[in-house]
Image (cartoon, rainbow, N blue to C red):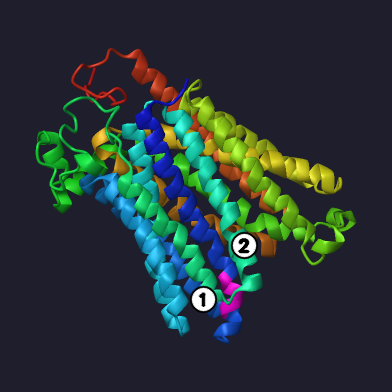
């Protein structure tokens, strides 16, 4: 089914934003190598300042989700794009390592806005949600691949400060595009649930004309936030949050350590790159192929959300995660081609799950708190999920390679168990008579 005009407009706007977030994110490690020489500092120091940039992306997701509910997604995304671009322009002027740290911190704070705001916009404004989630994910993967490629290529011919300026230009152009984009951000919500609220030409900034539910949503008191949070976590969303956190543990651990693991496999020694590309590790080719396969996985997962319920998709992906993790050890000794094929399948499934958990948030949460819901989701994904990097590092240092993949399999088994639990809760709720005054997925609180 073809996308309607509103879906296409939102898809284009959010795809641009998603790709640029990862464009900037993945270019930072390329600059890291240059900063080591430019400022004559240790790897530890540069690692700390890069962490200062990455940390707010997860930690800032929750307040960003609250802001998206309050002020509208379009405004937040435009602020994100402008902030990231200005941060990179600031990098080009940095003359000391503290200045670089400050710019990266500003980048991380503004980048944290995107995921809750962008996904909230898709969930409330798009009819063909699964398809747009798929294209949105593909755009993110494109940014993941192009960001470091463009930065590395630019550094071959330009001084790093000029490369930072070049990296900032697409974000500024995207702001100009976004200011002209027109769409209805709440096209698929119930009439009256967020009446009178909009973005772009429909946005009034104060939310005037909204019903009492919207006025309650914009109440800036701490008690309102606590109440909304309590309501969310008293519902099936609590299971969704844990499922996403486990997926984050698997995702972060796998993508962080696979390049290092691939470089060290004896089976890779027989794979020789072309002469003109000597110096590039063979494992790098396979890792890039994994990310490219992820684009196909994003698309397939998104299309399947229109045909398979989100929770069943989650179960299928977690089962595949277990199988892939356990298969890596025997396959790792079979040679470069079997390893490449397994990694391609790994990348496909690793990114195919993303549209399913994004759709699950939309299914199990009310529209008026969608930004807050995605804020918690990405706190779990990028915040709690980052613990997998530390845990994975400990396992890599202290135990054989088998233990690392056993750890990944354990994350996936736990995710599958919780997904099955969510399916059972969903089936019980669906089997019970619906209360016309409640939302589709709200659990009953009556004693009978």
Q: Which residue is drawn at 43% across and 82% down?
A: 98
**Residue 336 rendering spot, x and y as whole percentages:** 83, 48
Residue 320 sits in which quadrant? top right
Q: In 3D space, how far apart are the residues under numbered discs 2 and 1 (Cα atoms)? A: 33 Å
Residue situated in front as seen by the camera: 90 or 45: 90
Q: Residue at x 63, y 47 (%)?
A: 291
Q: Which residue is drawn at 18% across and 20% down?
A: 437
Q: Could you tell me which secondary element the residue under label 2 belongs to? A: helix
**Residue 323 rendering spot, x and y as whole percentages:** 68, 36
Residue at the extreme right: 270
Residue 360 sits in which quadrant? top left
Q: Which range of residues does the magenta coloring cover?
A: 31-35
Q: Mark 1 points at which residue?
A: 161
Whether tag 2 and tag 1 are in contact, CB under 8 A, the answer is no
Is disc 1 surrounded by few (<14), some (14 to 19) or many (20+) residues within 10 Å?
Answer: some
Residue 393 sits in which quadrant? bottom right
Is 122 part of what is drawn in magenta?
A: no
Name above or below for residue 162 compared with residue 25: below
Q: Is the magenta stretch mostly helix, strand or loop?
A: helix
Is 32 part of what is drawn in magenta?
A: yes
Q: Which of marks 2 and 1 is nearer the N terminus?
A: 1
* Rendered image: mark on residue 393: 2
| Left or right of 425, for residue 411 | right
């Amino acid at each position: 089914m073809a996308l309607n005009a509103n879906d296409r407009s939102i898809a284009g706007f959010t795809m641009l934003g998603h790709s640029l977030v990862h464009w900037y994110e993945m270019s930072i490690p390329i600059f890291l190598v240059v900063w080591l020489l430019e400022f004559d500092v240790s790897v530890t120091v540069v690692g700390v300042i890069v962490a200062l940039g990455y940390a707010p992306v997860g930690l800032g997701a929750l307040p960003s989700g609250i802001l998206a509910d309050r002020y509208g997604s379009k405004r937040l995304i435009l602020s994100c794009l402008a902030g990231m671009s200005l941060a990179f322009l600031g990098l080009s002027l940095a003359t000391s390592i503290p200045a670089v740290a400050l710019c990266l911190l500003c980048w991380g704070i503004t980048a944290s806005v995107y995921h809750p705001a962008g996904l909230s916009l898709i969930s409330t404004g798009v009819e063909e949600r699964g398809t747009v989630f798929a294209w949105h994910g593909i755009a993110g993967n494109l940014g993941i691949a192009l960001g470091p490629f463009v930065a590395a290529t630019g550094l071959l011919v330009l001084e790093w400060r000029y490369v930072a300026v070049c990296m900032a230009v697409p974000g500024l152009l995207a702001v100009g595009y976004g200011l002209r984009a027109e769409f209805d951000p709440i096209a698929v919500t119930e009439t009256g649930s967020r009446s009178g609220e909009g973005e772009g030409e429909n946005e009034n900034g104060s939310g005037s004309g909204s019903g009492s539910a919207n006025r309650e949503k914009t109440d800036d008191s701490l008690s309102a936030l606590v109440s909304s949070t309590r309501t969310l976590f008293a519902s099936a969303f609590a299971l969704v949050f844990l499922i996403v956190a486990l997926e984050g543990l698997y995702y972060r651990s796998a993508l962080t350590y696979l390049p290092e693991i691939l470089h060290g496999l004896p089976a890779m020694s027989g794979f020789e790159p072309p002469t003109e590309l000597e110096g590039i590790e063979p494992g790098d080719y396979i890792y890039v192929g994994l990310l490219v396969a992820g684009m196909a996985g994003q698309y397939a997962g998104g299309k399947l959300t229109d045909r398979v319920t989100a929770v069943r998709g989650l179960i299928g992906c977690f089962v595949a995660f277990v199988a892939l993790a356990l298969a890596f050890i025997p396959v790792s000794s079979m040679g470069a081609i079997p390893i490449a094929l397994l990694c391609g399948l790994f990348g496909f499934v690793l990114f195919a799950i993303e549209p399913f958990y994004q759709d699950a948030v939309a299914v199990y949460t009310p529209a008026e708190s969608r930004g807050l819901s995605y804020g918690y989701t990405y706190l779990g994904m990028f915040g709690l999920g980052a613990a997998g990097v530390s845990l994975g590092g400990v396992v890599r240092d202290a135990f054989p390679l088998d233990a690392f993949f056993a750890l990944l399999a354990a994350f996936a088994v736990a995710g599958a168990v919780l997904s099955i639990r969510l399916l059972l809760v969903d089936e019980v709720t669906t089997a019970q008579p619906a209360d016309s005054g409640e939302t589709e997925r709200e659990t009953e609180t009556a004693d009978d």
